[in-house]
Image (cartoon, coloured by chain):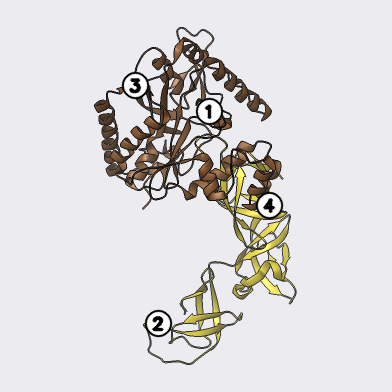
Chain colours: A yellow, B brown
Amino acid sequence: MANYSTNEFKGGLKIMLDGEPCAILENEMVKPGKGQAFNRVRIRKLISGKVLEKTFKSGDSVEGADVMDTDLAYLYTDGEFWHFMNNETFEQIAADEKAVGENVKWLVENDVCTITLWNGSPIAVTPPNFVELEITETDPGLKGDTAGTGGKPATLSTGAVVRVPLFVQIEEVIRVDTRTGEYVSRVK
Amino acid sequence: MPQPFWAPSADITTLKKRAAILAKIRGFFASKGVIEVETPSLCRASVTDVHLASFKTHFVGPGSEGGLDLYLQTSPEFAMKRLLAAGSGPIYQLAKAFRNEESGRHHNPEFTMLEWYRPGFDEFALMDEIEQLIQLILACQPCTRITYQQAFLDVLGIDPLTISFDELKQCANEHGYCDIAQQETNPDTLLQLLFCMQVEPKIGIDAPCFVYHFPASQAALAQLNEQDSRVAGRFELYYQGMELANGFNELTDAKEQVQRFNEDNLQRTQKGLSAVAIDQQFINALEHGLPPCSGVALGIDRLIMLALNKGHISDVIAFGIERA
């Protein structure tokens, strides 16, 4: 893997830090009036998801991380692995629990997810921004409420729990924003 | 709404206010009898400073058979000192300065620098005058003053003038800079790191703060202090997280100046950078005789950012580098 100098740092660049692949979020140059310049960099560790700040001496180099994102359709889980397929080559990849993490609750069959590969192995799964899921459990609630004041919890087919307006009922399909975990609308 | 790419990065109202600030600055110096001068942006020589990268270009034309390398100036300092040596008296310049490898919220590779020189002033008299100008533009609280040593003692509890290299490394480790500290061979780099990251954010918050008596090892073009040779007649001005100005009680000794340039070049080669030819015309001017004086360079774009409460240097210049 290539090395990157601090002059090449920018948001999105993937580098190795303490043996873990990381993505640069922000890069700021800090320089005293005279003397050595530094780069104050905000970094997200791609496996743990931790965000941290790190300072580099300007001009220093770090090792790049062989990380790439690929769009794959979710197929099924066998309980241990979650299987994804490239819709063009039909090549399949299995991601483990660690890679899928919390996003397991947004996995809908045939939805195309972004799988982050490090040295060819999946380390993160990002669902589409919006998914459509059926409600399996919620209080019958009051009909005729359209203002959406307060709302009520609803359990979805994947086990995810989101707040929905009172008028939404069991067996209805709703659209959810996976980035915030918030209800968007009913799906007809 | 993001502006289309042909449009200026600063809005027109800001540019009008900028023009008014520049007019005020010119008025300030006119009232004090300091003469405005203009010196070349393109010169045959550049600076040896290890941490400055200059732009180089090539002149072809009458009088330069085979062409001539020219450098965009990182500051008008050498040329202005040649004017002082020629008997100009007090002078100032609003100059474009050019520094490669510098870009960010507070840096544009091409920027406007206010540089002025006061024969007969020591650094403290010059700080008084800078304060007058700052008050004229920013109308802020009176500036405070602290020595470089006291700033470190207050914020980090270490004495930068007596601390051993090992203790300095330990201090850097404790503040989370192990990777840099481990490999560093130059104590000044660690002092600069700690100053930038730890000290600077804690000073000059409510009022602009002059930090003076920088260590002799970071004297740059300042004289060493006559009473305490561990420190130099160099100062900096900080306000609200911004480094605004750097000034010197100017070194007038040609021999010592050459020696410092040679040390810079030695450091450059050790770092794998190419050595920079010494500006011989500047040295000749020092040999002829630079009157005792103090001088300062003040970042005009940053001053305007503070005056107009803008967060990015591109907000106060017509076209930031991304639109240049």
Q: Assign a secondary structure to mark 1.
A: loop
Left or right relative to A35: residue B180: right
Q: Farthest residue to the front: give it.
A: B227
Instruction: Inspect the image, locate mark 3, and give the three-letter code of the amino acid beneath it.
Output: Pro
Q: CA distance from mark 1 to mark 3?
A: 22 Å
Q: CA distance from mark 3 to mark 4?
A: 52 Å
Q: CA distance from mark 2 to mark 3?
A: 72 Å
Rendered residue at 57%/49% (across/down): B157
Q: Which residue matches tag 3?
A: B90
Q: Is residue B8 visible?
A: no
- Chain of the residue under the numbered disc 4 shown in the image: A
- Tell me the number on the disc at residue B162: none
Of B169 and A104, the residue lying toward us: B169
Q: CA distance from mark 4 to mark 1?
A: 35 Å
Same chain for labels 1 and 3? Say yes or no.
Answer: yes
- Tell me the number on the disc at residue A17: 4
Of B109 and A115, the residue lying toward us: B109
